[in-house]
Amino acid sequence: MNRLEGKVALITGGTSGIGAETARLFIAEGAKVVISGRSEEKGSQLADDLGNNASYCLSDVTKEDEIENAIKHTTNSFGKLDILFNNAGGPVGAGLEDVTQKDIDYGVHLLLASVILGTKYAIEPMRKNGGGCIINNSSIAGIRYRQGDPLYSALKAAVTHFTKMSGVELGKDNIRVNAISPGAIATPIFWGGSAVSNSLSKEENERKLQKLEGNLANAVPLKRSGLATDIAEAALYLSSQAGSFVTCQDIVVDGGRTAMFNEYSS
Ligand code: NAD
């Protein structure tokens, strides 16, 4: 299928989990994709594996100039920007009684400011192009209780609301802005994100992933683990012609988890 033929996408945090899987799917659907991230080694390797329609850009989303640079890298490499997936993220805090100002500053930069600034810098190239599609990776943690990290939950709720507000403002420019709220999806975020997964061997990461998929299967009505590809497929729908009348929405992809009553869900 060529549902993204001729499209150019930037995926932040594209070297792992949901971002890497989305890059694979978008390229299979005909897009050219820039994956941005902080690991030069991992990013260059993935871009090589994905072929000529992929490019890697070193970019830390907690730094405004590096966000702007990733957008420039995309337009310089492939001539335009049609799709921005603000995906980068990870664990940010501690429990309510242990959280620090440093955690809060880091969390705001990583999860919220990155989305706001990514959106800001995408507007001009998308407007020039007659429109575009921005997808923000939010979370069901922004909708319901999640044990242990209220900072993460609050910031994801803010991401979802920002999505709707910016979607209203950018509708006149034919720029659609949507969020995806994943449920529990088996990725390295569960064992500390890239800070931990980069220090483990491929085999160790694979073992952890398989064990996690087994554990997550019992947590949802569908009785299987959420996979990175489930979120990639939602991003494809939003980015393709099929999603062309969809904006300001939060697409929940959670195997039914938010419908379950679970006082102490994680
Ligand atoms: P992951 O750890 O596999 O991937 C996260 C990516 O973000 C990694 O490539 C990491 O290096 C990158 N990243 C982290 N900090 C960064 C920074 N400062 N600058 C640039 N890149 C940075 O985890 P994932 O599950 O694929 O997470 C992707 C997104 O999905 C995150 O925003 C996460 O909050 C969201 N999410 C995940 C789940 C889940 O269950 N996996 C559920 C809800 C939401």
Image (tube, rainbow, N blue to C red):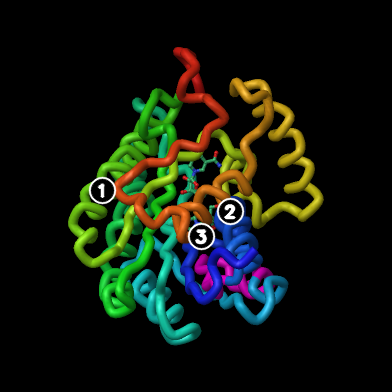
Please report whichever mark, 1 or 3, sits nearer to the chain's N-terminal start: 3
Q: Cβ(mark 2) to ligand 1 < 8 Å?
A: yes
Query: Are circles 2 and 1 on residues that touch, CB within 8 Å?
Result: no
**Mark 1: secondary structure:** helix
| Residues at discs 2 and 3 in contact (Cβ within 8 Å) | no
Please state which amino acid type lies under the numbered disc 2: Ser
Q: Amino acid at mark 3?
A: Gly
Give the label on residue 13, or none.
3
- Seen in the picture, residue 30 relative to 155 is either above or below; the reply is below
Task: Judge left or right: residue 84 versus residue 47.
Answer: left
Residue 88 visible in the picture: no
* Residue 227, disc: none
The percent coordinates of residue 266 (x first, y second) are 51, 25
Q: Residue furthest right?
A: 203
Q: Disc 2 designates what residue?
A: 194
Residue pointed to by mark 1: 162
Gap between marks 2 and 1 measured at Cα? 26 Å
Disc 3 within 8 angstroms of ligand 1 (CB): yes
Disc nearest the viewer among 2 and 1: 1
Mark 2 vs 3, N-terminal side: 3
Image point (50%, 68%), residue name: 36
What's the CA distance linking mark 1 and mark 3? 20 Å
Magenta part of the chain: 31-46
Of the two numbered discs 2 and 1 on the same chain, state the one appearing first in sequence.
1
The residue shown at (65%, 28%) is 216
Labels 2, 3: front one: 3
